[in-house]
Every structure is written in C-alpha cells, then in structure tokens.
Amino acid sequence: WVKTDAEPVVTLMEAGKRPRAMRETNSTEARAAFDAMTASARTLHDSVNAAREQAAASVAGVTRLLLILTVLAVLLVAGAITALFIALRTWVLEPLEAVGASVRRAADSPDHAAPIVPSGPPEIRAVALDAELLRRDLVKEIDEAEQAREGLVQDAPLVAAMRAELLGAPALPDSDLAIAGWNQSAEGVVSGD
C-alpha cells in the first residue's frame, strides 16, 4: 500500500496535482492495497493480542503455582516446627520433668527411701540411673553417720570416765626423766574402729 498508493499520492500532492492524487487514492488498485494492508494489520494485531493473552495466561499459571508452592512450604515448615515441639516435649521435657519430680520426692522423703525412677530416652534414663546410684550412696552415708552418732551416744559414759581418769592422773615428779610418745589418728566411722 505504501509503494502503490501512499508514495505516488504524496508525490502528486507535492507536485500540485491534487485532482489526479484524489483519483489515484480512490482507484480500485489503491482500495485493494489499502484493504490488504488493513487486513494484514488486523491479522498482526490479532496475533499480538493472542500472544499477549497466552503470555498472560502462562504468567498467571506460574503465579498460581508459586502461590500454591509457597502455601505448601509454609504449611510444611509449620508442621515440622509443630512435630519438633511435640517430639521435644515427648522425648525430652516430659521425661526430664518426671526424673526431676522423682528426685524431689527422694529428697523430700524423711528417710530418702523413695527411688528415682528412670524414664524416657536412653540418655535421660542413664542420668536417672546415675541419680539413683547417688541417692543410694547418700542414704548409705547417712545411715553410717547415724550409726556413728548412736555409737558416740552409747560410748559417751565410757569416754567421760576415761577423760576423768586421765585428768586426775598424778603429775610426775620433777626428775631427769624424759617421756617420749607418738600420736596416730584413728580412721573409720568412729575413732578406734
């Protein structure tokens, strides 16, 4: 259309041949070229619109997929955090609380005879077993100390009599007598054992 109609008409207009330019513009060949050019432009316009709509639909599909994947990722992370919290509570916190309560029960009982009961995963059970061994050793030490205290109470009259006897011993006369002695500490729960 540009070569067959527009350029020749512009050339005629510039040359001052207006009536001839109008005839050329209204000719059958010019109309056919114009119609072909507008049909081609319409086809190009429709193709561009179709490509744009296809691209927009593709972008919308990808956006929708990204949104779904993001929601799934958030749900998975939330589920993982919840599962981690439940596992931590079940496998660590509850067994530790049970062992702590058992230790407090053993400490608060008058004779410390309440056993420390192991529970939970192997690591926490091992700590509870170690605490139970410690409790047994402490109870044994308390029993031995109580026996020693009772022994001292029973032997108190004997100790008092020996002290009185030793304090009341006559003094040695002044002479050139030299006295030597040595001291060895007694070992055991009660001295002299």
Image (spheres, helix red, strand yellow):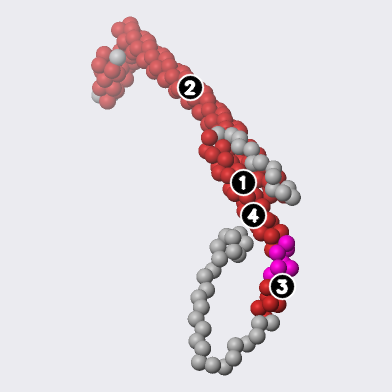
Residue at point 70% right, 77% down?
164
Q: Main secondary structure of the magenta part?
A: helix
User: How far across and how far down the image is residue 183, in percent?
Assistant: 52, 74
Q: Amino acid at mark 1?
A: Arg
Q: Which residue is mark 4?
A: 144
What label does residue 136 carry, if any? 1
Q: Which quadrant of the structure image shows residue 55?
A: top left
Give the distance between the C-alpha atoms of the residues marked 4 and 1, in whole angstroms: 12 Å
Q: Which quadrant of the structure image shows residue 27?
A: top left
User: How far across and how far down the image is residue 69, in percent?
Assistant: 49, 25
User: How far across and how far down the image is residue 87, in percent?
Assistant: 57, 32
Disc nearest the viewer among 3 and 4: 3
Disc nearest the viewer among 3 and 2: 3
Q: Is residue 87 above or below residue 108?
A: above
Give the distance between the C-alpha atoms of the residues marked 1 and 3, in whole angstroms: 38 Å
Give the distance between the C-alpha atoms of the residues marked 3 and 2, in whole angstroms: 99 Å
Give the distance between the C-alpha atoms of the residues marked 1 and 2, in whole angstroms: 64 Å
Q: Earlier in the sequence, mark 1 or mark 2?
A: 2
Q: Which residue is mark 2?
A: 65
Disc nearest the viewer among 4 and 2: 4
Q: Is residue 85 visible?
A: no
What label does residue 87 carry, if any? none
Q: Earlier in the sequence, mark 3 or mark 2?
A: 2
Q: Amino acid at mark 3?
A: Ala
Position of 7 compared to 142: left or right?
left
Position of 15 compared to 53: left or right?
left
What label does residue 161 carry, if any? 3
